[in-house]
Amino acid sequence: MAFDEVVFWKENVEFLNGKELLDEKVCTSVVYTDASGTGFGGYIVEYGESEVIGSWKPDEQVKSSTWRELEAVYRMLMSKLNYLKGQKVLWRTDNQNVVHILCKGSVKLDLQTIAINIANICIREAIQLSPQWIPRTDNVKAYSFSKTSDCDDWEIKEYIFNHFDKKWGRHSIDRFPSDYNRKCIRFNSKHWCTGTEGIDAFNYAWAGENNWIVPPPSLIAKWIQLGQTIEDEILAAGVTSENFSTLADRMVHFLIHSRSDNTTKLYHGAFRRFEKFIISEGGVAIPAEPIHVSLYLTKLLDSGSSHSVLQTAFYAIKWAHNINNLDDPTDNNFAKNLLESSKRQEHSPKVKKDIIDSADIVKLCEKSGRYYSLIYKNKPLSYTRARECIVNRLKEVCKNLNIGLHSLRASGATKAANSNVSDRCWKRHGRWKSDSAKDGYVADSLEHRLEVTKHLGI
């Protein structure tokens, strides 16, 4: 590290010998950053779409607050280089150590490394950076970003990727990940992170690559034409302004997140399937004709799709039109009756989940020790994702069973019933309202089933 510093000063001592004081009044950009225990965030005051939101990896979460605050400056700088090149930047942070380190360096190796990286970037890109401490009360927006869970930060399971990697051939680049959920060595990312080939996949040519594409929910607005619809509404109202354009972008964001992320992804996928069908037939997906929606539902019924599939398609088309403030093409008797008809079609019988022996639970606890992590990063979990994580853990000790969360309820009910526990007690314990619902969870033991024959007296 000492040798690196000698090289740095040898190459830059003349250039850095003396520094122009940056007057707040003549700065061309103002940047705010902050970091918390779970993530970091920042924004450029002069640009409406300059927000950066990111999460720390587990090994980064345990580092010092100064490291996280300084690393937030570095990642914000790397993410928004196109905005900051050649600028006089006033950089505001609520950590006094960061201001000191950016001005004078640090005796700690990890902090000094980040400081030198920031200095090298500023020299290379002709950025004049002046750090300024501000109280936390003046840094509320960046602080809220650092506490925000990035809704676009999601991933698919490894076995799903491996399946399609074998089916479609090895993928050469992942277009929408971060450094900790990428599926390929090469990748683009939303914001700067270690190893990325570039920020914003749409800035690079995709031709000649076998691209792995798992787009973030924020891109859904582009597919359902929401941004264009809002712009058209603003123009039709007869008044336009720069502030209206900024508010329109925020409006798109809030409308897309009017449903949970999982629901939005589900509806987006279902609507894209409808769109593909209707375009292949020469129709239009938005706004869709009611008869075209009914014909699509008929196609799904004719192919043996379940009521759940038709219901998802029905409400996905309704969602895409409602969010665009368009007439609902599902609000007609054809579509409604086809949805009702799907409930009465013959489908494969339900297969109940297998029960789990208490010994399997004990085995899992012994395997994991005191506790078992569901995921490897600190972020909020939806119910669906938490359920998937729990089932995946259970399958480690119950590999050949058809299990789900209901396996746990069924196992408890079965154990209680076969141990001659009062029906009234374990029905109340399991919160079942009826005997038929309660009995559906019980797998009677062979011994209990034979008792009927034994007591016939023949």
Image (tube, helix red, strand yellow):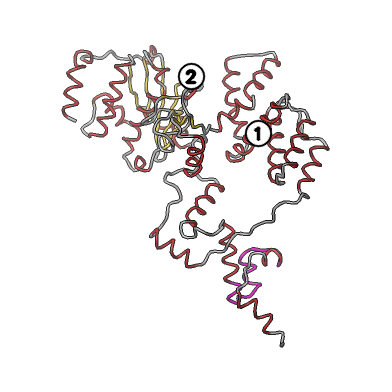
- Taking the image as shown, residue 43 lies to the left or right of residue 62, namely right
Q: Is residue 364 above or below residue 232?
A: below
Coordinates of residue 436 in the picture (x, y in percent):
71, 65
Q: From what the image shows, is residue 58 above or below residue 192?
A: below
Q: Nearer the viewer, residue 23 or 307?
A: 307
**Residue that sits furthest to the bottom in the current view:** 457
Residue at 63%, 59% in the rendered image? 352
Q: Mark 2 highlights which residue? A: 47
Determine the image quadrant of residue 41: top left
Q: Secondary structure at mark 2?
A: loop
Pointer 2 or 1: first along the chain: 2
Left or right: residue 19 versus residue 320 is left
- Give x and y (percent) for residue 339: 77, 43
**Farthest residue, direction right:** 333
Quarter holding residue 58: top left
Decide: is 298 above or below 247: below
- Residue 95: name its quadrant: top left
Give me the C-alpha separation between circle 2 and circle 1.
Answer: 36 Å
Q: Which residues are magenta?
A: 416-435
Q: Nearer the viewer, residue 229 or 310?
A: 310
Q: Is residue 93 above or below residue 84?
A: below
Residue depicted at 44% across the width and 22% down the height: 44
Q: Amino acid at mark 2?
A: Tyr
Three-letter amino acid code of the residue under disc 1: Arg
Helix, strand or loop at mark 1: helix
Expressed as whole percent of the image width and height from the top left, the position of residue 359 reads: 47, 67
Q: Which residue is mark 1?
A: 273
Residue shown at the point (33%, 16%) measured from the top left: 125
Q: Rate crowding at label 1 as few (under 14), some (14 to 19) or many (20 or more) other CA atoms within 10 Å.
A: few
Image quarter hosting the C terminus = bottom right
Check residue 119 for magenta coloring.
Answer: no
